[in-house]
Image (tube, grey):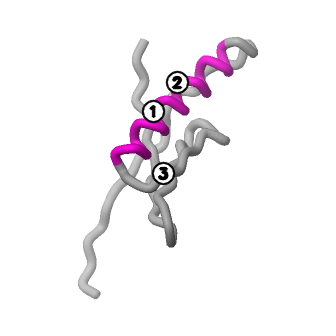
Amino acid sequence: MKKEFLIIIEKGKNNLSAYVPDLPGCIATAETEKKLLKLIEEGIELHIEDMKQRGYKIPTPTTKSAKIEIAA
């Protein structure tokens, strides 16, 4: 069964980082967005594989996102 997880991408001073709110501890950092997306995808797969091996229930993704445009 496929699940779609929201990832949050943040720009730091020297790199980008990403985390998965529905999978605490699942993070990645990289210098480019392309590399970051590859690493976080691999991280999600490894995180879930580890959870399965430990007998943990894989959470159903519940985090959503939205954007609000305001005049600044």
How far from the left and from the top, in percent, is residue 56? 71, 19
Real-space CA distance between mark 3 and mark 2, rounded to the nearest whole angstrom: 17 Å
Position of the C terminus, as image quadrant, is bottom left
Q: Main secondary structure of the magenta part?
A: helix
Viewer-side label of 1, 3: 3
Residue 6 quadrant: top left
Residue 57: which disc?
A: none
The residue singled out by tag 1 in the image is 41
Q: Is residue 38 left or right of residue 17?
A: left
**In the visual, does 66 lie left or right of 47?**
left
User: Mark 2 or mark 3, which is nearer the start of the sequence?
Assistant: 3
Identify which residue, 43 or 57, lies in the foreground. Answer: 43
The mark found on residue 30 in the picture is 3
Q: Amino acid at mark 1?
A: Glu
Q: Nearer the viewer, mark 3 or mark 2?
A: 3
Find the magenta span and give its range.
Answer: 34-52
Mark 3 belongs to which amino acid?
Ala
Residue at which label 2 appears: 45
**In the image, 54: left or right of 2?**
right
* Vertical relation: 5 (above or below) 49: below
Query: Decide: marks 3, 2 in contact (CB < 8 A)?
Result: no
Q: Is disc 1 surrounded by few (<14), some (14 to 19) or many (20+) residues within 10 Å?
A: some
Q: Residue at x 48, y 38 (%)?
A: 40
Tag 2: amino acid: Glu
**C-alpha gap between disc 2 and disc 1:** 6 Å
Mark with earlier residue (1, 3) = 3
Query: x, y percentage for residue 15?
Result: 48, 61
58 within the magenta span: no
Q: What kind of element bears circle 3?
A: strand
